């Protein structure tokens, strides 16, 4: 961890319309200062409510700490027969020392990742430090600053799957420290980026690595929750003080403890306060507030008894898993609970926040095209530790950027991320596939493609709700209550958010379209569509050859001389991207592979309306074409009509088939023909039954809540209805089981 003296290069302005421009130097836009004098020495300093999406009254200190749990082995197993379980932590805290410094957050923990002397990973050579410099903190942060006077709540942070403690919502961690919280983000040994890197190298290079401290064999979430409880112990008993040289135990209020986490860290935070009944793990009753960002119960480890067990205050934020949405009313014992459902929430961007784009750029810059393909192809050769740059891309962004048109970089980053990247490097990044060069050239002029649902806005929302939630629930500061209600003022302020407090009530809307129903969108000049629904339609010829779409993947369709117009759009569309999951898009596959996978209706609505591409949904849901189901697509030259057919494709985790067809004429007429439909939802979000219709993809977020769905079945065999349409509009219907209306308290 190093410190750079530099000024922030961007200021968060009117964030709902902000186009993010992120460089490897700046690390992204900083939160605005509240204008308060830093460090007044008045303890919590809660004489007035600081705006929760702005920096608080304190400057921000940071340090890294290593602690060891002697009761467990490195992999979490017991009884301990070794030196114990090593845990690295990043700690943010309030300080009264003004600063303009910026801390650089790296992926590389030198005590763990570099394998000094081969001691941590026997069989793996010593590794040079990863050459990626890492992103700067978005706000001024002073390394090893003295802790401010006063008494502060303690928050324990838990990172996502295979990430690091410094990359877990760093912008929000910084802001919480400025508002008077001590935030200790624990790195879960054996489920972090360091473990992934070494495990990946061992498998790729055929090295005999051991002992492997992966924790899956001993319960990943169980060990993570044990880590959280151990860090609380260490913070209160002086262990962290001894390791850091700072007197945290004297400044922490032991009665005000919260947890927060991103993705798998969200489930860790939830399991900490519910306990894990199936594994005999009780709730940690010292924790009275838990915030879950982008995940809550992955794998459905927790059951109804666990849900009802907690009396802590709960906040579920960035609901892109849908699990919290379906289970929200089951938390009958919670002191209070909130669901901050964010439309079009990008899972990984929401976790990395302003580090996303700088890290992505640096990882691309470090690729060595001469050896990179061989390393990734599994050829061990003579591995030189100095060539560690050749695997950094996979080790950090393997889960996000696996195709020429994938998400993250195009949607949320400024085009400058490609400035220093040669065509040769780009080709190497995509494992030798030169298609990426043309895609970058095509999309670069419009980057970022999602200026409204931006990195800055998602980070601001996360910070606002985290600060308001913990200030209200841990400090009983009721001045923050106004940020924690579904008022019209909050809807205008936070247009991406649908906010629920205590009880979620959603009306069921079962699929009522019938086999043979055909929804026709006939363009009327540049003004909109004549919309009609007729019964008794038969499928067109599906064509002879399936597209060969593999699970969670796409196929591109383009035909010489064929294109079609869309009302309100300047240019005709000549490229179709057919997705396994029941829809056709027209720009990129970015995140659309999971558009109706595990989200709430609000989240799915944002995915469709804000995705910067014209979208046609036959039945957008988590479909699975890996079995007998197939997807066809071809150009009927006689009719100049492209036909895409989903034949016997079931929903994931089911076997009941879905049969659907999309037909697009060169005059712009779009037909959705319904065959046999299976009334099943995604395997972990049964409330979502599917989304059908079209969307321009450029709806302003201020109009998101006012863009209402339609009821197609009411139009069946009735008069044609004209519907205005342009790139900001959508004509769609969402089908869902709804939620239980019972919101009883225990």
Image (cartoon, rainbow, N blue to C red):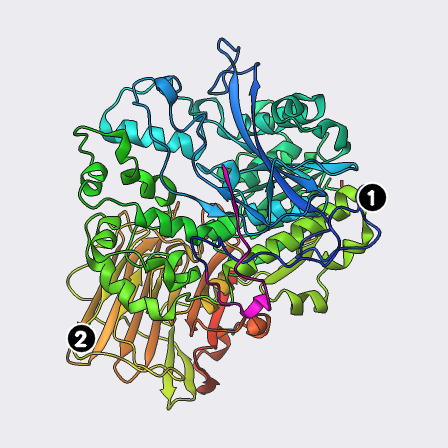
Q: Is residue 283 visible?
A: yes
> Visible in this render: residue 282?
no
Q: Residues within 10 Å of mark 1 (few under 14, many from 20)?
A: few
Q: Is residue 11 magenta?
A: yes
Q: Nearer the viewer, residue 224 or 194?
A: 194
Is 118 located above or below residue 608 in the figure? above
Q: Position of residue 389 (x, y in %)?
A: 30, 39
Above or below residue 701? Residue 376 is above
> Which residue lies at the image location 37% right of the left edge and 52% below the top edge?
361
Give how far apart the Cα atoms at labels 2 and 1 are.
Answer: 75 Å
Residue at x 70% of width, y 41% of height:
95
Q: Residue 394 location, x and y as percent? A: 32, 42
Describe the element under mark 2 as helix, strand or loop.
strand
Find residue 355 and report its horizontal and vertical position in percent. 47, 49
Residue nearer the viewer, 41 or 51? 41
Crowding near pointer 2: few (<14 within 10 Å), some, many (20+)?
Answer: some
Residue that numbered label 2 is attached to:
636
66 sits to left or right of 392: right
Q: Position of residue 223 (x, y in %)?
A: 53, 25
State the quadrant of the C terminus. Answer: top right
Q: In the image, which residues are magenta?
A: 1-21
Left or right of 564 in this view: 355: right
Image quadrant of residue 521? bottom left
Describe the element under mark 1 as helix, strand or loop: loop
User: Could you tell me if the residues under marks 2 and 1 are in contact, i.e. CB atoms within 8 Å?
Assistant: no
Residue marked by disc 1: 42
């Amino acid at each position: 961890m190093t410190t750079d003296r530099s000024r922030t290069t961007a200021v968060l302005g009117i964030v709902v319309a902000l186009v993010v421009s992120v460089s490897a130097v700046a690390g992204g836009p900083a939160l605005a200062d509240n204008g308060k004098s830093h460090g007044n020495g008045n303890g919590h300093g809660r004489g007035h409510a600081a705006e929760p999406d702005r920096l608080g009254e304190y400057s921000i200190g940071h340090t890294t700490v290593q602690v060891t749990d002697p009761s467990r082995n490195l992999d979490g197993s017991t009884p301990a027969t070794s030196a114990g379980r090593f845990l690295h932590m990043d700690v943010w805290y309030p300080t009264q020392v003004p600063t303009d410094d910026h801390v650089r957050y790296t992926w590389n923990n030198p005590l763990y990742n570099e394998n000094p002397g081969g001691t941590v990973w026997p069989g793996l050579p010593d590794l040079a430090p990863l050459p990626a410099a890492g992103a700067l903190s978005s706000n001024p942060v002073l390394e090893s600053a003295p802790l401010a006077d006063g008494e502060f709540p303690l928050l324990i942070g838990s990172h996502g799957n295979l990430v690091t403690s410094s990359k877990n919502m760093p912008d929000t961690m910084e802001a919480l420290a400025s508002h008077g919280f001590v935030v200790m983000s624990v790195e879960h040994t054996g489920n972090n980026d360091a473990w992934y890197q070494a495990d990946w190298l061992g498998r790729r290079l055929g090295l005999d690595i051991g002992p492997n401290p992966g924790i899956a064999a001993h319960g990943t979430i169980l060990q993570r929750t044990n880590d959280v409880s151990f860090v609380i112990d260490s913070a209160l008993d002086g262990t962290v003080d001894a390791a850091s040289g700072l007197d945290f135990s004297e400044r922490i209020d032991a009665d005000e403890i919260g947890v927060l986490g991103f993705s798998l860290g969200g489930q860790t935070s939830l399991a900490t306060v519910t306990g894990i009944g199936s594994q005999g793990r009780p709730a940690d009753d010292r924790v009275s507030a838990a915030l879950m960002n982008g995940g809550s119960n992955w794998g459905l480890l927790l059951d109804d008894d666990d849900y009802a067990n907690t009396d802590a205050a709960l906040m579920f934020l960035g609901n892109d898993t849908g699990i919290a949405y379906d289970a929200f009313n089951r938390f009958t014992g919670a002191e209070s609970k909130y669901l901050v459902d964010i439309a079009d929430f990008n899972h990984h961007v929401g976790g990395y926040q302003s580090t996303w784009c700088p890290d992505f750029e640096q990882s691309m810059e470090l690729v060595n095209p001469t050896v990179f393909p061989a390393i990734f192809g599994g050829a061990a050769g003579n591995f030189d530790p100095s060539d560690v740059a050749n695997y950094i891309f996979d080790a950090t962004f393997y889960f996000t950027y696996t195709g020429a048109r994938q998400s993250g970089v195009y949607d949320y980053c400024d085009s400058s991320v490609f400035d220093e990247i040669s065509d040769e490097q780009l080709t190497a990044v995509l494992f030798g596939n030169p298609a990426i060069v043309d895609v970058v050239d095509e999309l670069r002029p419009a980057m970022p493609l999602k200026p409204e649902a931006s990195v800055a806005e998602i980070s601001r929302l996360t910070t606002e709700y985290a600060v308001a939630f913990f200030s209200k629930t841990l400090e009983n500061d009721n001045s923050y209550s106004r940020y924690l209600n579904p008022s019209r003022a909050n809807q205008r302020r936070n247009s991406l958010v649908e906010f629920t407090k205590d009880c979620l009530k959603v009306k069921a809307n079962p699929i009522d379209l019938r086999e043979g129903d055909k929804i026709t969108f006939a363009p009327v000049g540049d003004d909109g569509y004549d919309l009609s629904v007729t019964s008794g339609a038969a499928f067109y010829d599906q064509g002879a050859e399936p597209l060969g779409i593999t699970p969670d993947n796409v196929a591109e369709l383009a035909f010489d001389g064929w294109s079609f117009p869309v009302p309100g759009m300047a240019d005709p569309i000549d490229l179709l991207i057919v997705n396994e999951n029941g829809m056709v898009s027209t720009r990129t596959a970015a995140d659309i592979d999971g558009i109706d996978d595990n989200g709430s209706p609000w989240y799915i609505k944002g995915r469709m309306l804000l995705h910067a591409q014209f979208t046609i949904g036959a039945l957008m849901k988590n479909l699975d074409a890996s079995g007998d189901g197939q997807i066809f697509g071809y150009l009927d030259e006689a009719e100049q009509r492209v036909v895409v057919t989903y034949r016997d494709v079931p929903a994931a985790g089911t076997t009941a088939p879905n049969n659907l067809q999309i037909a697009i004429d060169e005059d712009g007429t779009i037909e959705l023909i319904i065959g046999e439909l299976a009334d099943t939802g995604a395997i972990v979000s049964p409330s979502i039954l599917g989304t059908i219709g079209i969307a321009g993809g450029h709806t302003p977020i201020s109009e998101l809540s006012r863009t209402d769905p339609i009821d197609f079945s009411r139009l069946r065999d009735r008069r044609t209805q004209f519907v205005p349409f342009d790139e900001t509009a959508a004509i769609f219907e969402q089908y869902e089981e709804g939620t239980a209306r019972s919101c009883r308290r225990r």
